[in-house]
Amino acid sequence: MRHLIALCLAAVLATPALADPAAWAREWPVTDFTRTTIPDWSEVISGGPPRDGIPAIDAPVFLPVAEEGRLADIEPVMTLEITGEAPRAYPIRYLMWHEIVNDTVGGIPVAVTFCPLCNSGVTFDRRLDGAVLSFGVSGKLRHSDMVMYDRETESWWQQATGEGVVGVHSGTPLTKLPGFMESWAQFRDRNPGGLVMDQPAGFTRDYGRNPYVGYDSSARPFLFSGEMPPHGIDPLARVVRVGERAWPLERLATAGEIGEAGVNLSWAAGQASALDTARIAEGRDVGSVRVRDGAGQDLVHDVMFAFAFHAFWPDGEWMLGE
């Protein structure tokens, strides 16, 4: 909690000076601030670390599943399965500290992203209009969600939505890939021939530690001043977002399986919350979610906090059941 208080204070102190494109332009001389979809610049604040203070990972190294001995069974990983390629797992213990992994899988340049403050894990295709983008962490937040930037044009991108929000790519969406989060044991047991991202070299990080202790049981999200979710839903309750619909994770966990609006959702126990205890491997079990269409194909989705869904999809549909 002390880490979050320090970050919050830093952001509050920095906000008056930073909520101004003229000030940002000195740090971002290439970014075209005349092009934006952000209605109010005060929505953008400093998250504490400067640009690239949270270093994205480029050219990650992978291990065969059988050679990985650091991960606990219950630890969460981001899974990416591309036809014809060995499935890949990106441990949250690394994404917690780096937030973006720029990778290439089967010739497809991808960005695997995770924003701890929103619990948002989304994988994107890095190709756009014939070019390949590479992404870094801007150090800025909007509605508590990471603002990414591409190194080629220095446009800013909203991690939760995958949409360009500032610069020449403002208003342009990235293509999302149907990655998902599950436990290391679930990935390993299903994919004995799979690959897992190795611990990044050259960084002094306490991988496996959660710097946001107790965050997902807090009363309010940090660095967020927007409207709370409707229907009495706790702001830090997890929801399964598919497009502009959100299913409360609690409802899905109780039911085990839900089929609605052409979407089939299933839940299985065995995945730790990365944002609970000091060690990720000791987090409480929040379970894993799979989302498929009627043909059994994985669908793009995100398991995020309710406040973030409401912030970015204020007119979205809450799938509360009866």
Image: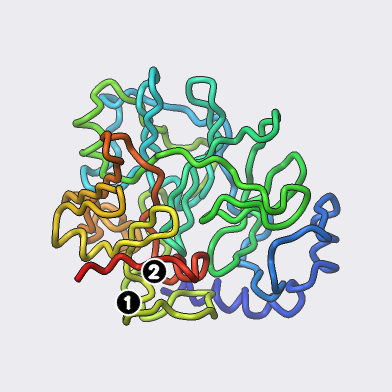
Which residue is tagged 2? 306
Q: Residue at the far left: name it.
A: 255
Q: Is residue 142 above or below residue 230?
A: above
Q: 72 or 319, which lies in front? A: 319
- Asked if residue 55 lies left or right of residue 179, the reply is right
Point out residue 92 in the picture as x, y percentages from the top left corner: 39, 47
Quarter of the figure with the C terminus = bottom left
Label 2 crowd (10 A; few <14 / some 14-19 / many >=20) = many
Point out residue 99 in the picture as x, y percentages from the top left corner: 51, 50
Q: Earlier in the sequence, mark 2 or mark 1?
A: 1
Which residue is tagged 1? 233
SS class, disc 2: helix
Query: Which residue type carries mark 1?
Result: Ile
Point out residue 59 in the picture as x, y percentages from the top left corner: 56, 29
Which residue does the image show at 39% across and 40% down from the upper left? 179
- Asked if residue 189 lies left or right of residue 276, the reply is left
- Asked if residue 123 lies left or right of residue 91, the reply is right
Which residue does the image show at 17% across and 52% down from the upper left? 257
Q: Residue at the far front: name it.
A: 261
Residue 171 visible here: yes
The reply to whether dot 2 and dot 1 touch (C-beta < 8 Å) is yes
Q: Quadrant of residue 298?
A: top left
Image colouring: rainbow
Quarter of the figure with the N terminus = bottom left
Q: Quadrant of residue 68?
A: top left
Q: 169 or 77, which lies in front? A: 169
